[in-house]
Image: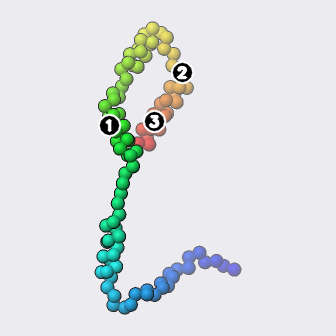
């Protein structure tokens, strides 16, 4: 037994519309349906926009953090963990590539 997964063109059923009826009425009806569509954004969208605006005003480099690390390096007490450094670099790379 052979099953044909691509049977080809299928016959269309006859329309119940009488011959000679205008498609203009159908088109107007479809336009009316689409004219009634509405969109409403949630409150979350407004919150996200506010957070984005606030984040745009934040400095990209935190000078206090940079200064404390500089002091630790100068004092010889800064001992970064290589695994954490590598993990942070990979995480940053993943964020940059996904954007």
Q: Earlier in the sequence, mark 3 or mark 2?
A: 2
Q: Which residue is mark 1?
A: 53
Between the C-alphas of marks 3 and 2, the distance is 19 Å
Q: Residue at x 33, y 66 (%)?
A: 36
Q: Is residue 7 above or below residue 49?
A: below
Mark 3 burial class by Cα count in 10 Å: few <14, some 14-19, many 20+:
few
Q: Which residue is mark 3?
A: 93
Secondary structure, mark 1, is helix
Left or right of 90? Residue 23 is left
Secondary structure, mark 3, is helix
Q: Earlier in the sequence, mark 1 or mark 3?
A: 1
Left or right of 52? Residue 7 is right
When asked about the image quadrant of residue 25, the answer is bottom left
Q: Position of residue 73 (x, y in %)?
A: 44, 13
Between the C-alphas of marks 2 and 1, the distance is 35 Å
Q: Position of residue 60 (x, y in %)?
A: 35, 28
Q: Are marks 1 and 3 in contact (CB under 8 Å)?
A: no
Q: Residue at x 52, y 80 (%)?
A: 8
Q: Are marks 2 and 1 in contact (CB under 8 Å)?
A: no
Between the C-alphas of marks 1 and 3, the distance is 24 Å
Q: Which residue is mark 2?
A: 81
Q: Position of residue 5 (x, y in %)?
A: 59, 75
Locate the C terminus and report the quarter of the image it occupies: top left
Locate the N terminus and report the quarter of the image it occupies: bottom right
Q: Is residue 23 above or below residue 60?
A: below
Left or right of 81? Residue 64 is left
Q: Earlier in the sequence, mark 2 or mark 1?
A: 1
Secondary structure, mark 2, is loop
Q: Residue at x 47, y 84 (%)?
A: 12
């Amino acid at each position: 037994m052979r099953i044909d997964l691509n049977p080809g063109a299928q016959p269309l059923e006859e329309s119940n519309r009488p011959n000679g009826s205008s498609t203009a009425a159908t088109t107007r009806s479809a336009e009316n349906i689409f004219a009634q569509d509405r969109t409403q954004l949630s409150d979350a969208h407004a919150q996200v926009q506010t957070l984005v605006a606030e984040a745009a005003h934040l400095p990209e480099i935190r000078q206090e953090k940079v200064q404390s690390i500089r002091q630790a390096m100068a004092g010889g007490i800064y001992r970064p963990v290589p695994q954490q450094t590598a993990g942070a670099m990979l995480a940053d790379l993943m964020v940059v590539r996904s954007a």
